[in-house]
Image: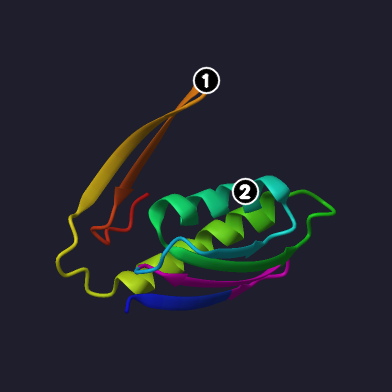
Amino acid sequence: MRKASIERNTKETSIAVEVNLDGQGNYDIETGIGFLNHMLEQLSRHSLIDITVKAKGDTHIDYHHTTEDSALAIGEALNKALGNRVGITRFGQALSAMDETLSRVVVDCSNRPYL
């Protein structure tokens, strides 16, 4: 199975992430930031990727470091879980209408060093 775990520790944050790309959309998210928890739960639910995130950060100052370092750790875990990428389409995109918004997601899995 395509799984990975990452721990990221900085002066501002301590984050542990686990992903299972072949999951069922199960999640256990604790970042200390309600909206970030909600968005990561939606990512897990709609992608069917099992995601666990345990993050502690300097949220008494602001949410920036916890949000950024959580995203970096999740990205590292996804990269590790993808392995050699055999059989994976290089990129994909999706549009989703939600209430008064249009959400767009584009993912490039080519392993190039660009965002």
- Disc count in the image? 2
Q: Amino acid at mark 2?
A: His
Q: Which x, y percent locates residue 65? A: 67, 56
Mark 2 closeness class: few <14, some 14–19, many ≥20 residues within 10 Å: few
Residue 11 in magenta? yes
Q: CB under 8 Å between callouts 1 and 2?
A: no
Check disc 2 and report its element: helix, strand or loop.
helix
Q: Amino acid at mark 1?
A: Glu
Residue occupying image coordinates x 48% and y 57%:
44
Vertical order, 22 against 61 (above or below): below
Give the CA distance from mark 1 to mark 2: 18 Å
Q: Which residue is identified by label 1?
A: 100
Residue occupying image coordinates x 30% and y 70%:
82
Residue 89, by quadrant, is: bottom left
Q: Which x, y percent locates residue 6? A: 51, 76
Mark 1 closeness class: few <14, some 14–19, many ≥20 residues within 10 Å: few
Q: Which residue is identified by label 2?
A: 38
Tell whether 50 sits left or right of 55: left
Residue 61 in magenta? no
Q: Which x, y percent locates residue 18? A: 51, 73
54 or 113, nearer to the observer:
54
Vertical order, 35 against 23 (above or below): above
Q: Which x, y percent locates residue 92? A: 25, 46
88 or 64, nearer to the observer:
88
57 or 10, nearer to the observer:
57
Bounds of the magenta segment: 8-21
Residue with the most extreme right position: 60
Residue with the most extreme front position: 24
